[in-house]
Amino acid sequence: MPMKRMACTILVPALLVLVGTSACMTPLRERVVFAEGGIRVGIQHDPTTGRTSPPALNSHPARLTLEEVRSLLGSLQVSGYSGTLMGLFATLRPNPLFKDEEIQLLAAPIADALAQAGPQDRVFFSVPDRAAPYNEDRTEGMMFLRGPYLHVVLTDHYAVTRADTAGGEDLKDPRDTKGMQLWVASPAKAATLSPEEAPRWGAFEKVHISLNVRDTLAARAASLSPPQAAAQKNAPLQSTQSQPDARMGPESAAQGESPVDLRMQIRELTSSNLELRARLEEQARQMESLKEELARLQGELGKTNPKAQSRRKTPSP
């Protein structure tokens, strides 16, 4: 018994030292590439690469253009609820994972991080809610390229609030995913992976999605009209909207509508006006018919009513 107690006395401090050492070494495997305005983008070790034998390797360093990164980020959507009972019955409505201004700020740092990452690295991002600076929740996650696929993992999103703690400690639980789910905006589609292609996700990596990079870029490019595609391709990084067409009206130009959409709206308005005019003409004809019918009824009523005849004064002799 004394020997066992002595062994436990020596083993426990040794384990604490090892845990502390590993905790101190973990941040060394994370490198920040961009940190500005509360946004953080960097490179960290990808644990999914070591969960297979032999280890799976990512397609890094990867070369993607800014336009390709913007298109891929713009195809991602997220849905979720607050973790309350009402949220369990709410209809899931996917919303863009990143706002337009966030995509413009993230495109260059993510492209640089993918170009600097190694085969066993992934890129992480952390974006605050710029509209609510006191909101502690952030949009956080990771992404990496492996073969033809881009894999995205989401751990938090500032637009989805945490579950009600009922007066308890307001601490973030990594198991609380807020019912989040990632989507791919139409016309692109999420990739269906075979068991051999799917990464070995960890226990806290439940919210993830995969998309074929080439198919997604082709689908989004085909959905744009030629003027829109050219304007988007030539748009500077700081610009969030393409230049309006000179043939468009001021209201349509302010809203960024395309000439095709404008012509469709004009055609719909013209059709609506013609239909409304036809209804008004039909109502006018019905009113005239009713007036004629009323006059006829009044004439017949005057002939058959003797009291109406007696009210007339007879001329004096």
Image (spheres, helix red, strand yellow):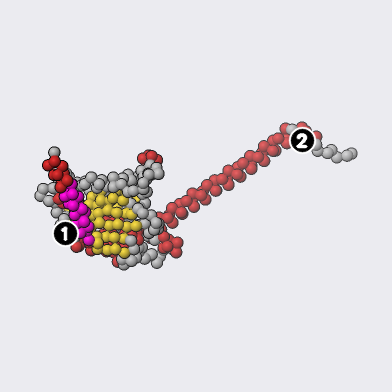
Count of marks overlaid on the render: 2
Residue at the (45%, 52%) spot, across then down: 271
Disc 1: which residue: 118
Residue 62 position, x and y percent, is: 18, 60
Q: Which residues are magenta?
A: 12-31
From the viewer's side, name the closer residue of 2 and 182.
Answer: 2
When asked about the image quadrant of residue 84, the answer is top left
User: Residue at the right extreme?
Assistant: 317
Magenta stretch, main secondary structure, is helix
- Position of 165 compared to 289: left or right? left
The C terminus sits in image quarter: top right
Crowdedness near tag 1: few (<14), some (14–19) or many (≥20) residues, C-alpha within 10 Å:
some
Q: Is residue 186 above or below residue 2?
A: below
From the viewer's side, name the closer residue of 136 and 196.
Answer: 136
For the residue marked with disc 2, what is the amino acid? Ala
For the residue marked with disc 1, what is the amino acid? Gly
Q: Is residue 36 above or below residue 150?
A: below
Q: How far, Cα to Cα, is label 1 from label 2?
A: 107 Å
Residue 285 position, x and y percent, is: 57, 45
From the viewer's side, name the closer residue of 184 and 120.
Answer: 120
User: Residue at the front extreme?
Assistant: 2
Residue at the (73%, 35%) spot, across then down: 303
Residue at the (72%, 32%) spot, across then down: 304
